[in-house]
Image: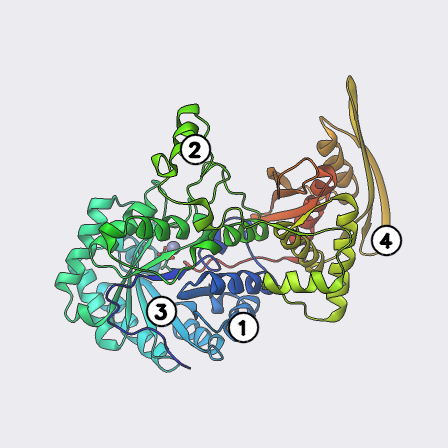
Amino acid sequence: MENKMASNMNGKLIIFDTTLRDGEQSPGAAMTQEMKIRIARQLEKLGVDIIEAGFAAASPGDFAAVSAVAKTVKESTVCSLARAMENDVRRAGEAIRSAKSGRIHTFIATSPIHMQHKLRMNEDQVVERAISAVKWALEYTDDVEFSAEDAVRSDMDFLVRVFDAAIQAGARTLNVPDTVGYSIPAAWGERMRQLIARVPNSDKVIWSTHCHNDLGLAVANSLSAVLNGARQVECTINGLGERAGNASLEEVVMAVKTRRDIFNLDTRIDTTQIVPTSKLVSSITGYPVQPNKAIVGANAFAHESGIHQDGVIKHRETYEIMRAEDVGWNANKLTLGKLSGRNALRQRFTALNIEFASEEAFNAAFQRFKELADRKNEIFDEDLQALVSDEAIAQISEYYRLVAMRAHSETGALPTARVVMSIDGAEHQADAQGGGPVDATFKAIEQVVKSGAELQLFSVNNITSGTDAQGEVTVRLSKGGRIVNGQGADTDIVVASAKAYLNALNKLHSRLERAHPQI
Ligand code: KIV
Ligand code: ZN
């Protein structure tokens, strides 16, 4: 296994992406192995330095997913998270064994509140465990990262002691997390500055920051840490992550690039891949991007006010500090149409980094492409991504499957829907009325399935522009403490809604779920 990180990274900011681990801890964002591989390949193309692929010890499924990402990715380091427990660290080590460049990221909580109530360990025990964890990890790779969970609420003297011990044990990266999103930029920068000043041999390691967004300050705090010596930022695409999320990769990267005059640092990120990556993650996880989100929101580069429009037409820089094309907007060129053949489709999939496990799988995608092209004149890259997601979704489990449906709405009459679906191969039909055609469709499905699940979210987004665009629907269901996101895409948004609802039911049925690593 080759390791890419030199310890003196002057002038370089390392981008550590944890979309597949912390991002996956967002409610309902659990991913299958196939989904993780698709995102990992795109992250590799984006140029992230480290991909945290998961928490290998959480379940056999997580272990398999981390191992598969480790086997697939060649240009980025692949990392697994591990609590500072022997079994966790060894599972992480085994999962990254086949990576060209692999890292183990081990963590233990260091704040009084976590040590007393969660770990029931005293300071000496925590230090001893941190040392052991780093040493177990070193049996598998010399690229070991150590995190002091809840560093934000940890005693400064104790943090210095723990990080000193971790360096002496052999950790090469020390991560300082604001686990609960409590800090503010000045305080967070100062914490990083003091740690680097006080921990012996701090110049021999990379200091990293990992911020949560509970106060909406994750990016600001991360950047403040960078200004005070951090040379690795842990972040996620679209700011996905536990609770209010993590620092958003696209915002951190574009801040450092746009204000190079202040940061004087470079990343390896190919910024033109930012928007395609954001769209892929959104479509796979079912987390839509808010229109006014910086960099990747649909309105991020739209100028509404007449004064702004006039200024931009006369001289773009009057109101634009970044160019839309530099972050990958407008990359959705017309790709294919009804007359495109198998070769053209295959080439486009290859350009999008999408591989098929077999010729049969490609044939199924070609068939879906032809069906879509019958209903939609222009097929964009985003349509192809959605088509593959739909195919992957269908493979999660076909326990519940939509066979046919119709929905009727008319001014002054109650909307109705008829759904024909198969459950474990047997066909069922139901009719229902509802407040709208989607409501009627969901009621008809529930008449048959009787899941009793609570609908927590229903959202529709157009994948591309135009009235013939496919609608991508996310449905979030919760039942018995489990939360799942279901997705469906179709040019008919009622059909997309039915597919999304059934996809969520299939996830509940297949028990696709994620154990919570931070226990
Ligand atoms: O937020 C956190 O503290 C974490 C650690 C595991 C790094 O995600
Ligand atoms: Zn975190």
Which circle, 1 or 4, is nearer the viewer? Answer: 1
* Observer able to see residue 242: no
Q: In the rendering, which numbered label is found on residue 368?
A: none
Q: Which residue is mark 2?
A: 313
Q: Identify the mark nearer the N-term, 4 or 2.
A: 2
Is there a contact, CB below 8 Å, between mark 1 and mark 4? no
Q: Secondary structure at mark 3?
A: loop
Q: Secondary structure at mark 4?
A: strand
Q: Position of residue 355 (x, y in %)?
A: 64, 67
Ligand 1 lies under 8 Å from the Cβ of mark 3? no
**Three-letter amino acid code at disc 2?**
Ile
**Three-letter amino acid code at disc 3?**
Ala
Left or right: where does residue 28 sit relative to residue 403? left
Q: Identify the mark nearer the N-term, 3 or 4.
A: 3
Q: Which residue is mark 4?
A: 426
Q: Which residue is mark 3?
A: 84
Which circle, 3 or 1, is nearer the viewer? Answer: 1
- Give the quadrant of residue 388: bottom right
Left or right: where does residue 326 sit relative to residue 170? right
- Give the quadrant of residue 194: bottom left
Left or right: where does residue 33 sit relative to residue 292? right
Q: In the rendering, which numbered label is found on residue 72?
A: 1
Spatial CA span between label 2 and label 1? 45 Å
Q: Position of residue 189 (x, y in %)?
A: 21, 51
Q: Between 233 and 199, which is closer to the camera in this rendering? A: 233
Q: Position of residue 385 (x, y in %)?
A: 63, 54
Spatial CA span between label 3 and label 1? 27 Å
Q: Identify the mark nearer the N-term, 1 or 4.
A: 1
Would you call the spot at circle 2 few (<14 residues within 10 Å), some (14-19), or many (20 or more)? few
Is there a contact, CB below 8 Å, between mark 4 and mark 2? no
Q: Secondary structure at mark 1?
A: helix
